[in-house]
Image (cartoon, rainbow, N blue to C red):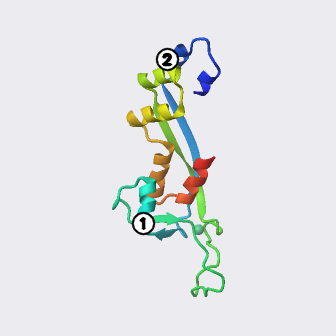
Amino acid sequence: MRLLALKPRQPEKVAATITAAVNQRLIRLLCETCRQAYEPPAALLEKLGIPKGRVEVLYREFQPPPPGTKKRKGEPEICPDCGGLGYKGRTAFFELIRVSEDMRRALVEQPRPEILRRLAHEAGSLSMQEEGVLLVARGATSVSELQRVLKQ
Ligand SMILES: [Zn+2]
């Protein structure tokens, strides 16, 4: 869509050369030492599009106990592995859209994001959101981190 927004003289020729589009985001990985498991509410699973019963727990970054709570003996104040950030390291996740003939036609005739998104989905491409949810379901990152990254 960005290429065609440059108003080339022969948009169908430009569209014919596009074979795929890649979208990429970086996302922080939860610190495996201090991440906290929780049972996701059914409404959250539904919102994420995770079928019921597929995951038992999701993970979130360490939530400090409320002030005044006694810490257990020998428990360090701050996670030694992430320095209390709750995250350690990053990974990339990708959306790969293979451009079909239908999409090429749409690019020339009605280049609207919702139409292209629907065609990509019908062709079996996972969206950024769906790719990110796979990372959340694996416990690699948190829902809040995915939301932050997708807002960018
Ligand atoms: Zn940690």
Residue at disc 2, CB closer than 8 Å to ligand 1? no
Q: Is residue 67 above or below residue 7?
A: below
Question: Which residue lies most toward the left here?
Answer: 53
Given residues 13 and 81, the one toward you in this image is 13
**At which x and y percent is residue 146?**
55, 54
The amino acid on which the numbered mark 1 sits, given as a three-letter code, is Val
- Quadrant placement of the N terminus: top right
Where is 47 relative to 9, above or below? below
Spatial CA span between label 1 and label 2: 45 Å
Quickly name the residue at label 1: 57
One can see residue 35 in this view: yes
Residue displayed at 42% across by 24% down: 102
Is the shortest distance between ligand 1 and the CB of mark 1 under 8 Å?
no
The answer to whether the residues at label 1 and label 2 have Cβ atoms under 8 Å apart is no
Q: Give coordinates of residue 8: x percent, y percent.
A: 62, 15
59 relative to 131, above or below: below
- Relative to the observer, which residue lies in front, 85 or 108? 108
Q: Position of residue 112 (x, y in %)?
A: 53, 30
Classify mark 1: residues with Cα within 10 Å, few (<14), some (14-19) or many (20+).
some
Q: Quadrant of residue 124?
A: top left
The residue at the point 48 percent across, 24 percent down is 106
**Dot 2: what SS?**
helix
Residue 125 coordinates in the image, percent (x, y): 42, 37
Q: Which residue is mark 2?
A: 16
The tag earlier along the polypeptide, 1 or 2, is 2
Circle 1: element type? loop
Crowd band around label 2 with a 10 angstrom C-alpha radius: few (<14), some (14–19), many (20+): some
Residue type for callout 2: Ala
Inspect this view and state whether residue 28 appears: no
